[in-house]
Every structure is written in structure tokens, then in C-alpha cells.
Amino acid sequence: METKYWHLTNHQEADEDKIIEAVQLLKQGEVVAFPTETVYGLGADATNAIAVEKIFKAKGRPQDNPLIAHVATKEQLSQLVTEIPKYVERLIEAFSPGPITYVLPSNGICAKNVTAGLSTVAVRIPEHPVANRLLQISGLPIAAPSANTSGKPSPTTALHVKEDLTGKIAGIIDGGATGVGMESTVVDCTQDYPVILRPGGITKEQLEQVVDKVLIDPAIRNGTSKELPKSPGMKYKHYSPEVPLLLVEGDVQAIQDQINEDKMQTKKVGVLASSRTAEQLQADEIIALGNNMAEIATNLYAALRKFKQDEVDIIICEVFPDEGIGAAVMNRLRKAADSMITKNE
Ligand code: AMP
Ligand code: MG
């Protein structure tokens, strides 16, 4: 299949024409990738099961992993669910549009394969102007997982989408690099209190400023426990780079010791670390992820994609504090990693 590529230029009229073309394809039941503030999404009409099936096929996504339906407004969100609890009204007021997804009882408007047969549907109002315009013009709920091959790091640029999906989808809207760089926070809103099913762009600490109590699905912390995650997607290995990834918990010296150990086995070692740690380390290739956790979140996926099989044999990555946006970063790193070791204890 030929994949159309629309490069947006920030000239409003020209861009509007391109977005309209993309909407036409979506209305014809085709699949189109577009930028959001979290990562690039791979969109299809959420009410059209045949169109939604094309998303699963292009990504190679397991059928039991439900998709997030994206809408332009709160009114549209309310058209997909049977009820909106009071605390969700408050969360919407505070954080939407933005990187937060609400799991609510579905009224069946979204196709069955969007919800993977569950009685609930996950809905998000994105903040990115291109995503928002696409949703407004189409008037449709758009089902959209990340626009990557399942298992690989999520795409934060249109080039990443191209690498994975050229020839497999109808089009790609290039609106530049995404901002947050991590997926949305998925919150189960079917109980008396919100339960975080997946940490993401809106932190637990932010949620706690708006509601009395926020719970965390136990499966998040013990990724390897027998606990069955409520969010089906959380059980799969995800976000994986081409070469093995080892997480090292410890100070700069501990990380350097691990690099040296791997180098002794004649391995070429790539490193991912905060800018401060990175400048104190020596390895074959080092990517400095940024000066703070927000920057590290923004840059992580692109960095994971940069390490290629023929250049390094292993990636060693620093362990970051598990709080704020760091909770989302560590959740993704634990899923991407082959192993984790703790030094200095
Ligand atoms: P992605 O589309 O890759 O951003 O992943 C969407 C995430 O939302 C996955 O972890 C899904 O399991 C989760 N999700 C989507 N719909 C639901 C739902 N109805 N209930 C619980 N989790 C959901
Ligand atoms: Mg994904």
C-alpha cells in the first residue's frame, strides 16, 4: 500500500487542507498516523470495526489489548460512556485536554475490537493542536494506539512512524516531535476512587491535588508478579530496543563498574543516563537524556531507537527515582529491560 506523507508547515491554510485529506481517508475506513502531545498515534474510526482491525494488523498488536478512543471534547467523551462519576468531572476539568485517559463503562458506540470485548472503554481528549483539529474536523471518536510496531519503543517523531509502518498504513501526518514523550496516564474510573492502571504524562502527585485518594494497580509495581493487570496491555514486553537492555541501580561508580565488566567480555557498551551522570561515564556510545525527569521522558524512546545492533552489544541504563514523571519512565524501562541489577547495597 502507498503511504501518503503530509508534512505540516505551520501555515494554517495549507495544513488544514492536509488534515482534511487525512480525515477523508479516516472516513473511508483507512488508518492514519498523527502527532499527539504524548507520542504519535495510529488512528482509525473507532465506530468501524473493519477500520480498527487494520490498526491491529499494521502494528502486529495482540487482539486482547484494547485501544484508547480519542475525542475532541467532553461532550463527545460523554457520548461513548454510560456515566461519568463526579470525580471524573473534576479530573476532566483539571487535566483534559491532556495526557490522561479515563476508563469508563462503555455504551457500545465504540466497536468491540476497540475495547477488546471489555465492558469498559478508555477515552482521552488530546491537547496537541493537530490531533485536536483532526478530531474536530472528523467529528469521530478515533481509536489510536502508539504508531509503532508492537513491542518496539513508541514513536516520538514522524520518522519513527515511517521506519515501522511505511507501506502498511494509508498516511502519516508529520507535525514535528511530540512533547511529553511518554504515553498518557490510564486511570480506571469505574470504582469509588481513581486507580492508575498505567503511569504516564499526568503524575499521581498531580491527580492527588484534585481528588482525595488515588490508588495504583498493584500489577504496575510488580511487573513480573502473578497479579493479572486490569489494563491488558501492561502484561506484554514493550518498548524494546534492538539490543539487550540492562538497568543498573547505583551511583556513578557502580554504573561505570558494570560498563567495565561488560567491556571485559569484549562487548561494545551503549549507555543511557541523565546528562549529569552521562558526563562522568566512559563507554563506547553514551546518550545523555537530559537535565531533569521531564527532559528524560521526552527523549527516552528516541534514544532507545538510536542504539543499533551493529553498533553496540548491550545498553546499560541508569535507574531513575520512581516518582512524578519518573514513575512513567521507570515503568517503561522495566518493561523494555531484559534485567535489572542493584549495586552498592
Ligand atoms: P496504547 O494504545 O499502546 O497507548 O495502550 C493503551 C493502554 O490502555 C493499554 O495498556 C491498554 O491495556 C489500556 N486500555 C485500553 N482500554 C482499556 C480498558 N477498557 N480497560 C483497561 N485498560 C485499557
Ligand atoms: Mg503503545
Image (cartoon, rainbow, N blue to C red):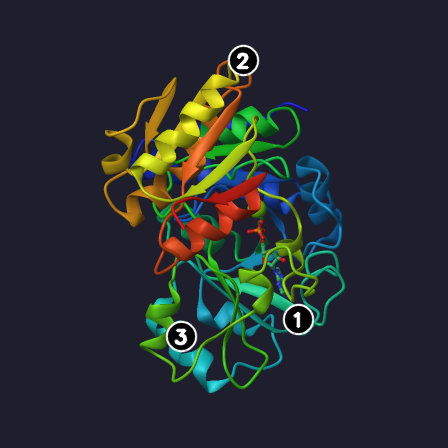
Residue at the image point whose x is 68% and y is 57% from the top: 114
Q: Residues within 10 Å of mark 3 (few under 14, many from 20)?
A: some
Residue at the image point whose x is 53% and y is 61% from the top: 221
Counting residues from the start of the chain, the first of labels 1 and 3 encountered is 3
Cα distance in 3D space between marks 1 and 2: 44 Å
Q: Residues within 10 Å of mark 1 (few under 14, many from 20)?
A: many
- The residue under label 1 is 120
Counting residues from the start of the chain, the first of labels 1 and 2 encountered is 1
Q: Which mark is residue 310?
A: 2
Cα distance in 3D space between marks 1 and 3: 18 Å
* Residue 310 place in picture, x, y as percent: 54, 13
Q: Which mark is residue 91?
A: 3
Cα distance in 3D space between marks 2 and 3: 46 Å
Q: Is residue 79 above or below residue 17?
A: below
Q: Say what secondary structure mark 2 lies in.
A: loop
- Quarter holding residue 12: top left
Q: Say what secondary structure mark 1 lies in.
A: strand
Tell which of 140 and 215 is nearer to you: 215
Under mark 3, the amino acid is Leu
Is any part of residue 338 visible from this angle? yes
Residue at the image point whose x is 42% and y is 27% from the top: 259
Beta carbon at label 1 within 8 Å of ligand 1: yes
The reply, left or right, for residue 145 in relation to residue 247 is right
- Quarter holding residue 339: top right
* Residue 198 place in picture, x, y as percent: 52, 60
